[in-house]
Amino acid sequence: GIGAAVAGAVMTLKPMVAAAADVEESLSKNRVLFGDAAAAAERFAEGSAEAFGISRREALEAVGVFGSLAHAMGMPQAEGVDLSVTMTKLAADMASFGNVSVEETLTALQAGLRGEAEPLRRFGVLLDAATLKAKALQMGLIENEKKALTPQAKALAAYEVILEQTLVQQDDFIRTSDGLANQQKILGATFDNISVEIGEKLLPAFKSIVTFLNEEFIPAFEDALEDPSVYNIAKGFGSVLHAGVAAGYVEGEVDAPLMVTIM
């Protein structure tokens, strides 16, 4: 009974620790991408649950993905943070406006910045070649319309076009935050934040356990297996266990799912 309780507790806490680890990785990634400007992204993520229905973990992850795109576009770090936060907010507004998940709009916006036009069509954004080239010319990214767009120029032009063509959708989450759909998003994001907070408190202990297993237990176990007598004992025990479980199954004392699990 105690073993089952401990196993249940571990299974409950493990996702929380994993979520906290995801936040830790996102923070590290964003600080590399944005340097000192990463603080602006972290401040945004702290309040994103209530303001946009996006948990801190989700906000940091989304900002990191957009940050990688901004870095590829050659943007300075401060401008990269601004683009990343703006796109993450826009994803929440587009999701609210279209009554879809934030994951869908994040994916579509990320695709748009990479030069893929189709994912954003369903959200009323048209990134055809002529529109992008006209915008690039207006921005001074090319000298004339005969010039081909570089991937960086295309991404910068797409960013401006996306902002222009989503004016009606911007700020929709705030306008409709009292509705059931957005209240549910806020609730879900808040619960995710609570899970991460619990996981962050447990993270040091789990790190210590995993480090011990990697550096102490596993090497010692591998050394022990090199002893033929230990190996034979383990092999013999395994054979007995398999035979015992199989016999129990034949006699009807062990059900099939349990036998499969043990064997």
Image (cartoon, rainbow, N blue to C red):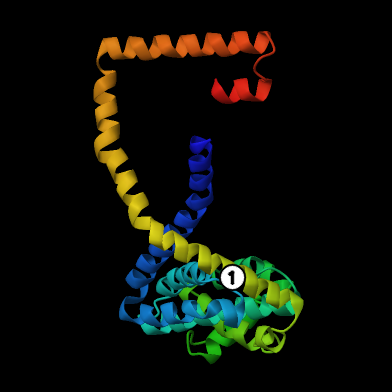
- Report the side of 1 relative to 22 (left or right): right
Residue 34 versus residue 71: which sits nearer the camera? 34
Left or right: 232 as drawn, with respect to 145: left
Instruction: Residue 233: name its quadrant.
Output: top left
226 and 124: which is toward the camera: 226
**Residue beneath label 1, please?**
189
Residue 251, relative to residue 170: is it above or below?
above
Q: Is residue 126 visible?
A: no
Q: Is 261 rendered above or below residue 40?
A: above
**Percent x, y of residue 222:** 28, 25
Picture coordinates of residue 99, whole percent (x, y): 75, 73
Q: Is residue 249 left or right of residue 210?
A: right
Q: In the depicted view, which residue is nearer to us: 224 or 145? A: 224
Q: Residue at x 54, y 85 (%)?
A: 136
Q: Residue at x 51, y 90 (%)?
A: 139
Assign a secondary structure to mark 1. helix
Residue type indicated by callout 1? Ala
- Residue at image coords 44%, 72%: 67
